Image (cartoon, grey):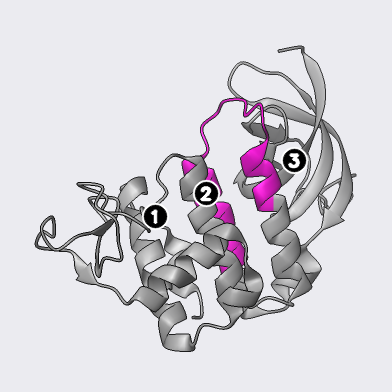
Amino acid sequence: MQKLYRDDAIVLRTHPLGEADRIITLLTRRHGKVRAVAKGVRRTGSRFGARLEPFGLVDVQLHTGKSLHTVTQVVTIESFAEGISGDYGRYTAASAMLETTDRLTDDVVDPNARQFLLLVGAMRTAAAGRIPAPLVLDAFLLRTLAYAGWAPELRTCATCGADGPHHAFDVAAGGLVCSACRRPGAVAVRQAAVEHMIFLLAGDWDAALGADGTIQLEASRLIADSVTWNLERSVRSLHYVER
């Protein structure tokens, strides 16, 4: 990688370093996830302090370091914070998206920039407020699992491949299971909840919005369980999401 490079990025998280600096975790479009030091960013007169906050889409210039890169320039492309931070439901859902991305994204280059584009699209949709935040979150989580190779099986048995419909969901097995393959720990699932997840994965908002609240909640729990299982740890922000 060249010493000085520039890329579009979305800020995933920040934490203090010393008295005036911050470590910024960024998901970039062409260079994967990077961690960089923003020097003096916590000072009142910082040139780009407010631009390096979570939910921000930025054009950033970085200097390559051994373990941490250094931010040298940053320009805001689009700030989603105003549309997200003023609403608790949007804020918690968007925070869960950032946390999940941070945990699932390796420090490698994604040549297709799929996760970056998915996250930017989800932030933009959440900030607009036209789609309920929990639905945006659930669609984002399902697609993130799919990009990571962990999409739950929603049409055939995840164990034997038998065609559905099936009425049990086994997180450990990877999705729906037939009655013959059902093990202790699998939970009953209604077909409407399965169809709702299929609509979310496909981005069919009209169909997804038509599901009643109990169906949406049932699907949300299965999606959250799938994320937790594959991460092997919980996403803390998910506990605060208003369903």
Residue 90 in picture, x, y percent from top left: 64, 73
Give amino acid for label 2.
Thr
Vertically, is 197 above or below 87?
above
Give amino acid for label 3.
Ala
Q: Is residue 127 left or right of residue 88?
A: right
Vertically, is 6 above or below 60?
above
* Mark closest to the chain's N terminus, 3 or 1: 3
Which range is magenta? 93-119
Residue under pointer 1: 227
Whether the magenta-drawn stretch holds residue 104 is answered as: yes
- Marks 1 and 2 sit apart, C-alpha to C-alpha, by 9 Å
* Mark closest to the chain's N terminus, 2 or 3: 3
Residue 14 in picture, x, y percent from top left: 63, 48
Residue under pointer 2: 144
Q: Secondary structure at mark 1?
A: helix
Residue under pointer 3: 9
